[in-house]
Image: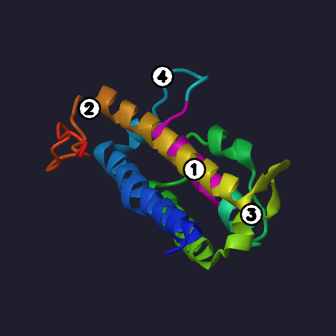
Amino acid sequence: MSLSTEFITQAVFRLHEESVPRLLQCVKEVNDEQLWWRPNENSNSIGNLVLHVTGNVNQWINAGLGGDDDTRVRQSEFDNRGEIGRVEMVECMDAVMSRAKQVLHGLRESDLLKIHSVQGYKETGVSIVLHVVEHFSYHVGQMTYIVKSLRDIDTGYYSGHNLDKRNNLV
């Protein structure tokens, strides 16, 4: 397996097998009012964060690497106060993420090394993929914190895993 193939495989795994399920769990754990709750005007709701990561993936992966039209209006992701319904929001995210998986699996090593222009930045394909994975995960962490704060629950992300295992140093 090549390094570029492994890189894409891991990026797809981190996005689609870790972050997206956690995001969906956060959305499921809250009611409609909590979905759009924000502690203050300088913070975002879970709903805003879902719109934001969807916009980011669409702009950076689908448009930046996949050649789709860049139609993002970033500020609208933060201005929304619940005008979009939960089902529509999740369906939009699902469509964007499905397209992103297709784009990622279609990348060649040359695409990962090439310089692309995204949101006014000049980035390599590797940099774009890393940015999206870490950005998505960062905001899922914020959503998780909001859910835990509002609901006082354990999200169970690591249920069934022994996180006290030590690395084999042999």
- Residue 89 in view (yes/no): yes
Which mark is in front, 2 or 1? 1
Q: Is residue 39 above or below residue 25?
A: above
Q: What residue is rendered at 35% in x and 45% in y?
A: 26
Q: Give the Cα distance between marks 4 and 1.
A: 19 Å
Looking at the image, tell me whether mark 3 or mark 4 is earlier in sequence order: 4
Which span is picked out in magenta? Answer: 44-58
Can residue 83 be seen in the rendering of this structure?
A: no
Q: Are marks 4 and 2 in contact (CB under 8 Å)?
A: no
Crowding around mark 2 (Cα neighbors within 10 Å: few <14, some 14 to 19, many 20+) is few
How far across and down, in percent of the image, does residue 97 sit? 53, 66
Question: Which one is in front in this view, the residue at disc 3 or the one at disc 2?
Answer: 3
Q: Which amino acid is tagged 1?
A: Val
Q: Which of the two discs, 2 and 1, labels the residue nearer the N terminus?
A: 1
> What separation in Å lies between label 3 and label 4 (alpha carbons)?
41 Å
What residue does disc 4 label?
39
